[in-house]
């Protein structure tokens, strides 16, 4: 009598297939978590998050719940060096934007160009190297803000970003022209 051979998976083959599927699922889920994580990671990203919140708070009259009435003339944004966090304050409520895993030597400074330098001069890349530090910058209910630059100092390098006082967005700065 001849036995007919049936083709089927062995228990070992089934276990290997399940283990492979589990390994692939773990890798995909772990990778997608980092893609979906919307928390900022750099000081510049946290700064922009704080700027958007401060401007929105000023436009809406403060950080009060919907329906509440408040006359907030401005929202002030500052940087707390001890907490390594930006703080938006409308006079009654504060929002804190902490920089995760901030380096101990990280410094953030709000500055305004020396007197006599206009926003157009700064935008053209002709600003003087010296600047007056500001304790905070203000965002107003009409969508404007204090004219300022923000300096990020980290690991000996300094990066300065000019902010447009009309839109609270980064101003494009023309690079200096090399003279022959």
Image: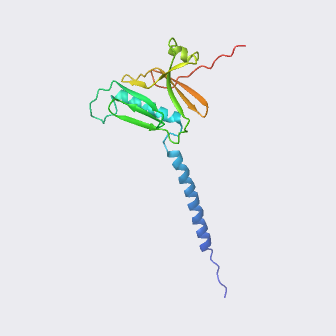
Residue at 55% from the left image edge and 22% from the top image edge:
172
The location of residue 68, given as percent across then percent down, is 27, 33
Q: Quadrant of the C terminus?
A: top right
Residue 9 seen in the current view: no
Taking the spot 40% from the left edge, 25% from the top edge, the residue there is 139
Residue furthest toward the right?
180
**Colour scheme in the image?**
rainbow
The reply to whether residue 97 is visible in this rendering is yes
Q: How many marks?
A: 0
Residue at horizontal 62 percent and vertical 77 percent from the top: 6
Tell me which residue sits at (62%, 20%) in the image.
175
Is 76 placed above or below 24 here?
A: above
In terms of depth relative to the viewer, which is nearer, 85 or 6? Answer: 85
Left or right of 104? Residue 98 is left
Q: Dividing the picture into quarters, in which one does residue 89 lie?
A: top left
In x, y percent, where is residue 141?
36, 24
Pinpoint residue 106: horizontal percent, then vertical percent: 54, 34
Question: Farthest residue toward the bottom?
Answer: 1
Residue 35 percent location from the top left of the image: 53, 45
Nearer the observer, 125 or 82: 82
Q: Quadrant of the N terminus?
A: bottom right
Give the image quarter of residue 135.
top left
């Amino acid at each position: 009598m001849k036995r007919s051979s049936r083709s089927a998976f062995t228990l070992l083959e089934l276990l290997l297939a399940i283990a492979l599927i589990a390994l692939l699922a773990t890798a995909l889920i772990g990778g997608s978590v980092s893609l979906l994580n919307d928390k900022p990671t750099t000081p510049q990203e946290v700064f922009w998050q704080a700027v958007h919140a401060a401007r929105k708070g000023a436009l809406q009259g403060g950080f009060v719940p919907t329906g509440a009435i408040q006359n907030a003339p401005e929202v002030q944004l500052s940087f707390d060096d001890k907490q390594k966090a930006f703080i938006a304050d409308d006079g009654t409520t504060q929002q804190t934007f902490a920089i995760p895993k901030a380096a101990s030597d990280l410094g953030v400074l709000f500055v305004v160009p020396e007197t006599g330098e206009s926003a157009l001069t700064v935008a053209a890349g002709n600003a003087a190297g010296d600047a007056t530090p500001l304790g905070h910058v203000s965002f107003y209910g009409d969508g404007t803000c204090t004219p300022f630059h923000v300096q990020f100092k980290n690991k000996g390098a300094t990066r300065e970003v000019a902010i447009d006082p009309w839109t609270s967005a980064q101003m494009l700065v023309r690079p200096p022209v090399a003279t022959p």
